[in-house]
Structures are given as structure tokens and as C-alpha cells.
Image (spheres, rainbow, N blue to C red):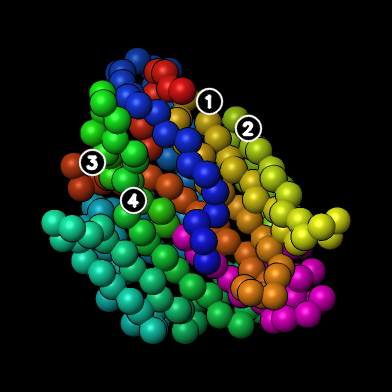
Amino acid sequence: MRSISRILLLTSWLFTSTAFSQISNEKIMGAAGKIAHDYFRVSPFNKDFSTFVSRLMNDPSLLQSTILRKTDTSLFFLEGIYSTHKPFFFRPEKVKVILSERETEADSLNPAQPFFLYQLVGFAPNGNEGKTDVQDEYEKLVRQYKRDFDMNQPRELKDGDTLTGEIRDFYFENVSFPVITLAWSSNSKNGNVLAITIRFLVYDNRAFLPIATYGF
């Protein structure tokens, strides 16, 4: 499935040791950590990143996996289908997990910066019932987590006048990109799909989200 949303990235960020930054960091990591804990089989936020990747790669319930290790010319990528992990209210036909390393675009002042997309995708059965399942689950997720974030931005997906899905990015005021994206869609190509995407960076072998003092 194509990456869920356009990512907003800042050209530089600063870290402070003020009480405001500490409180904000706890709020941000708490919200991301809650979603990772509630829906993903392995969370990146409560352990070293290398341990997280190892557990994900070696998870016995992960089937049909594709793993591309990082090299001088390519970034890390993992994709697989869970055999037993089904955290949604509806009964999915399959649940896919993706961990994909990406890079920001470099410019004359800033080199490319690596970051990770961690995505869980549930596929409901075809037909109107499956469409209702993913749409209802999406709306439950929005209600459940929207209070944990400072703002959110929805975008409808349409085929002509017909609503075929929605993408919603969740932001904190002092973080430069949407920490979480929720989405549902229903079309002939991908079927009935629900997706949860978490974005984070890795520093000193830990997943984290920067507290930014300024951005775009």
C-alpha cells in the first residue's frame, strides 16, 4: 500500500532541557507509545531500537516476510503478514506490518536525515460489510486518540462524488511532522483497508520524536 500521507519535515531542530520540553516529550512519547502498545505486536518505544528490530524480524507469528537490510546503497525495509496478531475490532482477512526506513530530502543547508515509518495494515473482506468494518474502526480510533494530540487534519478520498476513504494526520505543535496517521480506504485495487502509521527517528539506539523549537 502506498505511503499513507505527505510528510512535513523541518530543516533543523533544537533540543532543550527546560521543563516545557520535558513535559512535551513525555506527552508526545506517551501518545505514540500508547498506540504502539495497543495495536502493534512489538513497540519500538520501550526498548533499544536494535532489540525492537530483532524481535520484529524473528517474530514466529510473522509469515511471508520480506527483509532488506541496510547497505551503502539501500535503506532498511521489512514487510510481513501476521498469522495470529489481529488487534482490530473487526475480523481481518490479513494483517500486514511494515517497517521502512526513509530519508528527508537534502538541500544546500541540510543533509538527508533518516527516519522510520512503522505501519500496521488490516484488510477486511470485500463488499459493503468490509467497507463498513474499516470505516467504523477508523472512526473509533479517531475518537479514542484525538484528545492525545494537539491537532489533527483529515483529508477525504473520493472517486467522483463517492467517498472511498479518509486520511487523518495527528500532530503536536512542537513536532515537525505528523506523529500518527490513521486511514481507511475502499477501492477495487486494495479492497477494504485500515492503516495505522507511526513516524519516528532513531538516535543512540533509541526511537524518539524530536522537540522542535521551529520548523517550516
Q: Point out residue 208 in the picture as x, y percentages from the top left corner.
A: 34, 41
Q: Tell which circle, 3 or 1, labels the residue nearer the N-terminal end.
A: 1
Q: Are marks 4 and 1 in contact (CB under 8 Å)?
A: no
The residue singled out by tag 1 in the image is 173
Measure how far apart labels 4 and 1 are at the Cα level: 23 Å
Q: Residue at x 51, y 61 (%)?
A: 2
Q: Tell which circle, 3 or 4, labels the residue nearer the N-terminal end.
A: 4
Q: Point out residue 189 in the picture as x, y percentages from the top left corner.
A: 64, 74
Measure how far apart labels 3 and 1 are at the Cα level: 21 Å
Measure how far apart labels 2 and 1 are at the Cα level: 8 Å
Q: Residue at x 73, y 49 (%)?
A: 156
Amino acid type, label 1: Glu
Q: Tell which circle, 2 or 4, labels the residue nearer the N-terminal end.
A: 4
Mark in the foreground, 2 or 4: 4
Mark in the foreground, 4 or 1: 4
The residue singled out by tag 2 in the image is 151
The residue singled out by tag 3 in the image is 203
Q: Nearer the viewer, residue 158 or 70?
A: 158
Does 160 sit left or right of 15 as displayed? right
The magenta-colored residue range is 119-137
Residue 214, magenta (yes or no): no
Q: Are marks 2 and 3 in contact (CB under 8 Å)?
A: no
Q: Point out residue 128 in the picture as x, y percentages from the top left corner.
A: 82, 76
Amino acid type, label 4: Arg
Amino acid type, label 3: Tyr
Does 145 sit left or right of 47 as displayed? right
Q: Tell which circle, 4 or 1, labels the residue nearer the N-terminal end.
A: 4
Q: Residue at x 68, y 63 (%)?
A: 185
The image's mark for residue 102 is 4
